[in-house]
Structures are given as C-alpha cells and as structure tokens.
Image: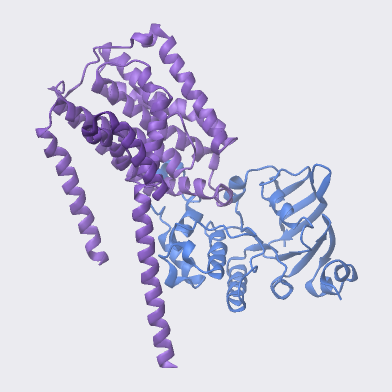
Chain colours: A blue, B purple
Amino acid sequence: MSAVLEVTDIKKNFGGISAVDGVSFDVREGEILGLIGPNGCGKSTLFNCILGQLTPSGGEVRLDGKLVTGLRPSELNKLGVSRTFQLLQVFPKLSVRENLILAGQEHQGNMASRLVGRSDAGLTETANQMIGFFKLDHLADEPAGGLSYGQQKLLDAAMAFMGGPRLVLLDEPAGGVNPSMLADLKDRLVAINREKNATFVVIEHNMEFVMSLCSRVMMMAEGKVLAMGRPDEVRKNPAVIEAYLGH
Amino acid sequence: MSSFAKPLKIALGLIVIAGLIIVPMNFNRYGLFILSQWAVMTIAAMGLNLTLGYAGQVSLAQGAFVGIGAYAAAIMTTHGWPLPAAILVAIVLSFAVGWVLGYPALRVQHHYLAFVTLAFSTLAFLVFRNESWLTGGIYGISNIPRPHIFSFATNKPLPFYYVCLGSLAIVSLAVWWLIRSPWGRAFMALRENPLRAQSLGIDTRRYTLMAFAIGSALGGVAGALYAPLTQYIDPVPFNLSLSLDLLMMVIVGGAGFYFGPFLGAMIAVLLPEWLRFTEGYYLMLYAVAVMLLLIWSPTGILGILDRYLAERRTKAASALRAVAKSRLETVQ
C-alpha cells in the first residue's frame, strides 16, 4: 500500500515552547491510524500543522508524494483532505441538509458556476444519501443547532465526507457521545473506510474506541512520538503505560 | 398550515408591490422625493447587509461608495453620457475599490476593521472635497440630468420614483438570487465560523473580497441613482454620518435578514418624516425610538419575528415529542 500522507520531522514552536518536536509518520491508503496521548502532548497542533491551519516551524508534509506544506486549509480540502474539530463545528442556523450541502458545494464546478447554477449545487441527492447513511433522516430539515450533542457530532463527521475525501482527520470524534451513538459512529466510519477506501487519522482519548477502530496507533508525549504499532502492541508498550494508559 | 404560508407570502408581496406602484401616484413632490430616497437607501443598505449581515465583515465605508457612485454618475451624465452607462461605471468602480478595501479584512476583523474602513471613508470624503478639478469641490456638481428611459423623460418626480423603484426591484432580485446560491451559504459560513469554512474548502479570502466588492458595488448603484434624484451633489452627504446611517438601517432592520434593509431604510428615512408633527422634538423622539427598539431587540425588527418563529418551532417540536412519548408509554 502506498502512503497517502507522509509527515517528516514536523516541528511547531510557540515562543520557547516546542509543541510538536520532530514528528515523522506516514499513513497508508485505506488505513485508520489512531493518534493518542495525554492532553497538551501536541496532537491537535500536529493536525493543525498538517492541515495548514498553523504554519510548521520546520519539516514537511506530503500528500500522495506531493509537497503540501504551507498550503491553505481550503486548498488542502480541494486536494481531498478533510477534517473535524475537537469542539463541535456545525452551522447551527442551517438545517442538517444545508450543512451537508455547504460542506460539499466547493467541490462542485467553479465560483462562476456556483453563482449562476442551482442553489443546492446539485448536492441534495448526495446530502440525502449522507443523511440516511448517518441515520439522521428524521432530522434532515431541522436546524443543526437544535440537535443533541451526539447528533451534532454525527452531522459534523458526515460533513467531513461530503467532498468525497481521500484522507480524513478526525479530532476526538467520540468526545461527549453516548455509547449507543458511539457504536453508530464507529459503524459508519468502518463502513466508509471499507466501501470507499477512505483513509483516516483519528485523535481520541476513548481507548476502547481507538483500539477497536484503528489498524495502527501512534502515541505522542511532550510533542514527540513515543510509540507506533498495532493497537495490541501499543497497549502493552511499557512507555505508553507509564506515560498515558496507567497501570 | 405551511401549505397556506407560501400563497400568503406571495399575496402579501404582491399587495406591497402594487401599493408601492399605485399609492405614490397621489403623493406630492416632497412625498415622492422621500419615497425615492427610501428606495435608493434600501439599495445601499442591501449592499452593506451583504457585507456585514451575511458575510460578517464590518464596514463603515458604505457612505463613501454611495459617494463614488454619485460622483461617477454626476460627472458622466453632465458630460452627456446616459445614466445606464454611468450606473455601469459606478458598479465597476465601486466593485474595484471595494475589492481593494477588502484586503485589510483578510488580516484584521471586528472593530479594527471598522477603523480601517472608517479611515477609507474619511479619505474618500477628502477626495470629494479637495479634488475640485474632478468633483467641483465644496461647490459640488449641479444640473444633474434625469434619464430618458426608452425616450420617455423621467424629469418629473413620479417617473423618476419609478426608475428608483425599478432599480430596487432589479437589485432585490439579484441579491435574492445571490443569497440563495452557494455563494450566500459561503458568506454565511464566513460569518459564523471561518475556521470550519476553510476546512470545507471555502476560499475565505476570495469570498471576503467578493463580499466587500459586491456590497460596495450596490453602494455605487445607490449613489448613481442618488445624483439624478437630488440633481445636485456636494461632498457633505457622503461623509461618515451616511455610513453610520446605513449601518443603523442594517442593524435596526435586522442584519443578515433579507428584508432587514427595506425596514431599516423605512425607519431611517420615513420615521423622522412621520414624526415631524412633533416639530422641534422629532429627531429626539426618533433617537429614543431607535434606542428602545435596539434595547428590546438587539437583532433588529426582523429579529423579533425570527425569535417568535423559533419559539413556535420549539413548542411544536416539544408537543410532538410529548405525543410520541405518551404513545410509547401506552404501547409499553
């Protein structure tokens, strides 16, 4: 399997503090890579460096072998990289369907055609399919702000898939989601991974969720990679137990 | 209930349009001037509503763009050019200047951006006042002609009111189309959550510039109509107070609501006239009315309606949930 994402020696300093310190890893096509570590270890900063929301202090990011370091988030999204955020980022005044149309519209045509073309950018059908896939049918026309936290998390995840991405970075998708909805979310992610061969990087603190979802797990501590391997290997790694999992 | 809502809205819209066409036929010269001014200011406020209300970019320069449009129209039409050509030039000029003014918005936001646009507003006023070779300086430009539309003269107040109303109708349809298009959704995303918008592939830089440029172009259209409406312009009407008035129209009507500028301009242009019977107190009463309104509803007049509809939706949803729960309990 070829690497979709290659991250080489990424560094990010904030003043004298090194939030990410020479992190290197790759993500293979169709893989689900878990990224774990204690709060403040640099996971989200690493995401933001990869996705162009922060400019790295050093190192490079390659997507399908092409150098993409420093590209803007919107440009990366056009290249097939999508993400969710740690905190909910849906548009509360728009309906569930409109949120999904918004999430996919920039992948349809160009600016001129989006101005003179259909108001839904031809995405109603795709949005409806996504709504069905994430079991949000009964909420399609509801304003997203009126949904429960777990439902908004599902919508947030669904939005990340509207542009048909190759690589999706999910920042704590399970945070605050109740167990039944969490099972739904995991099922959906696994289904998309299998059916569309989508590649994932998932930041998560819920160990059960990570270990059952991911094919490889990378553990970070103090801005560095502490361990990388299969979930069972990482779980047994003494350094990981010491720094994160506990005895 | 919802099956009646759409025909009801259409019927209401048709009544308002018919009223705007028929009722002013009985108005005197001054009444027609005020109503024409309302139409012109609504166009300018719609531009600002696009920039501020939909895209969330603060601007205190809309009055300057009305000025740019007004001077473009005044200079061109007094040199024999037809008004439609002058409107086109006003659109292009305001769009281009608005695009450039949008660049600071890529770096600064909120009150910092307000100060950048305020500085531009002052700069534009100084150009209108000091570059007398072009603008006539403090003496302004007089004898601005009104156009002939299909060889029909619009010199008199009523025909020119219809020119303003027709222009408002065209701009309204264009803005309606724009906000319902993916562009409108992108503007809203820019206002609500630029970080998330970027991650969804929305080029927030380009949309920010577009929001400024299109909003400014509508200010230019309003100015190009204002010049033949008053038939005389000087720099004073285009100083900062016009930008503040337009901002008030957008806020009072309801920023980010399609009909906000219509209502806001009505309050700002017509209310002081309706309060004239109070003689010396009319501006004070007007100020108090605006303050009370904004204390009661910071989201403007249409914000009141929006809140009412949201409460109604919540009650309906709660009732449905209660029915579903009781049915579930009955089955169990």
Quarter of the rendering containing residue B64: top left
* Residue A81 percent location from the top left of the image: 62, 54
Q: Residue at x 72, y 76 (%)?
A: A208
Q: Residue at x 38, y 70 (%)?
A: B315
Looking at the figure, which quarter contains the C terminus of chain B?
Answer: bottom left
A118 over B136 or under it: above or below: below
Report the label total.
Answer: 0
B109 over A66 or under it: above or below: above
Question: In this rendering, does residue B164 appear at all?
Answer: no
Quarter of the rendering containing residue B283: top left
B115 over B320 or under it: above or below: above
Question: In this rendering, does residue B92 appear at all?
Answer: yes
Quarter of the rendering containing residue A178: bottom right
Pick the residue in front: B304 or A1. B304
Q: Residue at x 31, y 16 (%)?
A: B233
Looking at the figure, which quarter contains the N terminus of chain B?
Answer: bottom left
Pick the residue in front: A38 or A158. A38
* Residue A6 percent location from the top left of the image: 75, 53
B163 over A104 or under it: above or below: above
* Residue A188 percent location from the top left of the image: 58, 72
Q: Residue at x 57, y 52 (%)?
A: B196
Q: Residue extending furthest left?
A: B26
